[in-house]
Image (tube, rainbow, N blue to C red):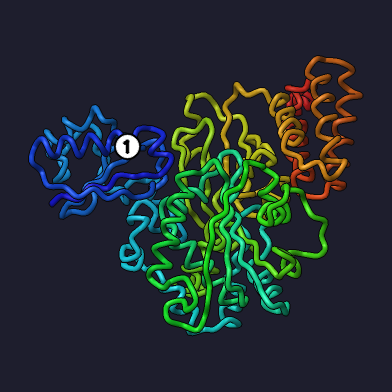
Amino acid sequence: MARIFIPRDAAALAVGAEAVAAAIRTEAAKRNHAIEVVRTGSRGLFWLEPMVEVETPAGRIAYGPVQAADIPSLFEAGWLIGAAHPRRVGRPEDLPFLQRQTRLTFARCGIVDPLSLEDYRSHGGYRGLTRALSLGPAGIVAEVTKSGLRGRGGAGFPTGIKWKTVADTAADRKYIVCNADEGDSGTFADRMLMEGDPFVLIEGMTIAGIAVGATRGYVYVRSEYPDAVRVMQAAIDVARAADCLGDRVCGTPYAFDIEVRVGAGAYVCGEETALLESLEGRRGVVRAKPPLPAHKGLFGRPTVINNLVSLASVPVILAEGAQHYADMGLGRSRGTMPIQLAGNVKYGGLFEAAFGLTLGEIVDDIGGGAASGRPVRAVQAGGPLGAYFPRALFETPYDYEAFAAADGLIGHGGLVVFDDTVDMARMARFAMEFCAIESCGKCTPCRIGSTRGVEVIDRIIAGTDRAANMALVEDLCQTMKFGSLCALGGFTPYPVLSALRHFPEDFGRPSLAAAAE
């Protein structure tokens, strides 16, 4: 019986994967071919989606992008044995985009059936938990600390320090909260993992719970991810039925269970304290700190809040050892990062690699430059509140400290590419407008500053008293950066100031090159 692997990841569904699956079943029945269809996640090569794979003696052979209309000719060509066809791309592992990656956290994405615990275990799943149980809580915390893992949600805070703080804080109950409220433009890593390998998150959260003494975990998912919510909930049910969650995890004395909670579409709920407010049933408004969530978080108890990718990286760290993970990367940025290439880019998708590649390598070599074929003018790194990098900064290494030195952010790993037709003044305006719309309204610099920012940039674009308004918007950005209660208002100046600094000609100023002449 031929095995055919068809992704049910949202990226593949958006371009016709369901129609392809239906066409394959219909054509196979018409030709009396016995097939088994396995619905997987995506491997992250989005320009090839839907990318369909068939199992052959030579390994899995991929075809893509496949549409329903291609199915009769694929069967006619003999694709079930890997035969030649215009849509044939060969072994996925041989494609340069995958070949150059170091897949640790995303190693199973696109390969396993996301809801098969047997499949997960046969590909190394639960090895991390097994070793974690042998180390005990203090040993787990020490291992995560030694690995150098930092928060993959944006702040880059050392995960081990956060866990130790919660572990050392006495309380009757503790919680693990997974922040999967992935709202940044150009990001999809959280969604890919939930839809393609949900058990790795369940395992990571379970290890975290044992490490700090928490018995309950929550996965906070954005409402715009219905497929991820469905797969995540189904995986939790499977894990619970197999005693991988519950009162005695895998037959041990440790208790841990997980619940999925769906947000209501507020970007600010990606901020950890606003997320806690939402989880507790209130409006998502930022809390003042201190107290830190590690001391007084969900329901007033010590709480580990980690981004989904941070928690999903823990199983491989425990399975392979902290040193294996720490040996990859650059400077204080250890391990791998799922870089998400989006926007006007030829090869969009997820590229997991150790820190240290340059921005130019990622955009030009891996991403293939702009999909339009025009020159790349700017790359926004770190979501809608991330800085714009001009080509002059493409030698910047992709790591936390190098980006900070260039007044930028790694954020959640998103890179949005723009060609030379982009209007950077309007992009700066968008950042202020975005902040004004998404602000929770609690602090004045964010609530009022962003609204005034839109007005000032509008005057600059209209050519009204440009010099005075340019000075005003820069002053306003400093107030927002240092006076806002959270990162929403505090980071909005990054795209605005970087646009002003690197693309002054779009604001009616001479370019730096022209000024030098």
Task: Measuring from the top left, give residue 135's x and y in whole percent.
Answer: 52, 84
Give the left or right position of residue 238, taking residue 1 as reference: right
Q: Residue at x 39, y 53 (%)?
A: 109
Task: Tell me if I can see residue 436 in this picture.
Answer: yes
Q: Is residue 148 above or below residue 135?
A: above
Q: Residue at x 16, y 40 (%)?
A: 79
Task: Tell me if I can see residue 401 in this picture.
Answer: no
Packing grade of label 1 (10 A; few <14, some 14-19, many >=20) is some
The amino acid type, in three-letter code, at marker 1 is Glu
Task: Measuring from the top left, give residue 449's x and y in whole percent.
Answer: 85, 35
Q: Is residue 294 above or below residue 36?
A: below
Q: Going by the picture, which residue comes out furthest to the front?
A: 281
Task: Measuring from the top left, give residue 63's x and y in whole percent.
Answer: 26, 39
Q: Is residue 106 above or below residue 492?
A: below
Depth check: give the residue in front, 355 or 273: 273
Give the left or right position of residue 314, taking residue 23 as reference: right
Q: Residue at x 74, y 27 (%)?
A: 429
Task: Measuring from the top left, give residue 173's x and y in whole percent.
Answer: 66, 74
Q: Going by the picture, which residue comes out furthest to the right?
A: 468
Location of residue 300 (image quadrant)? bottom right
Q: Which residue is mark 1?
A: 18
Q: Residue at x 78, y 39 (%)?
A: 493
Give the left or right position of residue 444, taking residue 406 as reference: right
SS class, disc 1: helix
Question: Where, quadrant-wise, is the C terminus in this rendering?
Answer: top right
